[in-house]
Image: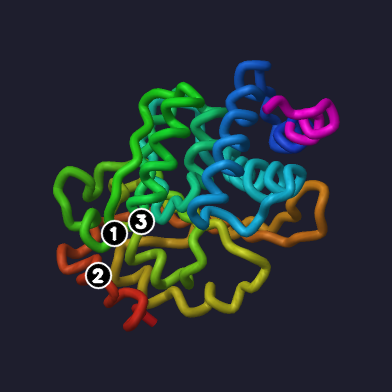
Amino acid sequence: MALDNELKQLLINGLAHYKIEVSDTQVEQFEKYMKLLKEWNKKINLTAIEDDKEIIIKHFIDSISIVPYVKDEEIKIIDVGTGAGFPGIPIKIVNPKNNITLLDSLDKRIKFLNEVINTVNITQISAIHGRAEDFGVNHEYREKYDIAVARAVSNLPVLLEYCLPFIKINGIFIAMKGSNTEEFDNCNKALDILGGKIEKIQKMELPFTNIERNVVVIRKFRQTPTKYPRKAGKPSKEPLI
């Protein structure tokens, strides 16, 4: 499935908004990704967004909105609760040097992600099945990443407990949030316990829409205590607030 000229231009212009230029090969990779997303979405629930234009804006361009904070270098990034691969796969397509881990708790989604990885032909990216609470205490993954990203719906104090354990000292966690900023005021306890500090809250509008977004950049300044993350289910039931 090739994108028609209008959709292709929409993608190119959306990426240009974030000062990203893409080759024909990269555009083709996005095309293949969208085709698989639509095919698999008929079998398993990957996204409620099915319109081509909306997929480009609300998944692809939205994912790319954090690339200004992610250099195209050989850095390790973990996408926690990646779902259908957002924002990890779009970041990988435009930043080929990044080494990305996609973490999700649903095995069906991992099968989808592996097919995308193979079909879209991207390397130095892996999809793993599991929960953040389990992998965050695993020495192979704990404090091994330069950047953690999450576009998950959990409140920020919960996301901090999921994500900060993965990051090296002086690394960053990038949380992609909606327009509501109330939860940002409830983060002080979690930040203090887990060793993070909010460095920036960037308010922005998603291109071609009037949808407001907030990108929250949290810097990790010391090690996260070994008792965090707590056992599966505990961070969401008893958040650090």
Dot 3, crowdedness within 10 Å: few (<14), some or many (≥20)?
some
Q: CA distance from mark 2 to mark 3?
A: 14 Å
Q: Nearer the viewer, residue 180 or 22?
A: 22
Disc number placed over residue 106 in the picture, else none:
3
Relative vertical location of residue 58 with respect to residue 224 in this rendering, above or below: above
Disc number placed over residue 232 in the picture, else none:
2
Task: Classify residue 22 by image quadrant.
Answer: top right
The structure residue drawn at horizontal position 62% and vertical position 37%, both measured from the top left corner, is 34
**Identity, as a three-letter code, of the amino acid under mark 1:** Arg
The question of residue 6 being in magenta is answered with yes
User: Residue 187: image x %, image y %?
Assistant: 44, 74
Q: Is residue 37 left or right of residue 204?
A: left
Relative vertical location of residue 81 with respect to residue 160 in this rendering, above or below: above
Q: Earlier in the sequence, mark 3 or mark 1?
A: 3
Q: Nearer the viewer, residue 48 or 188?
A: 48
The structure residue drawn at horizontal position 78% and vertical position 47%, both measured from the top left corner, is 207
Task: Classify residue 112 by image quadrant.
Answer: top left
Relative vertical location of residue 180 with respect to residue 221 in this rendering, above or below: below
Q: Earlier in the sequence, mark 1 or mark 2?
A: 1
Determine the residue located farthest toward the front in the rendered image: 43
Instruction: Say what secondary structure mark 3 lies in.
Output: loop
Q: Earlier in the sequence, mark 2 or mark 3?
A: 3
The question of residue 218 being in magenta is answered with no
Instruction: Say what secondary structure mark 1 lies in.
Output: loop
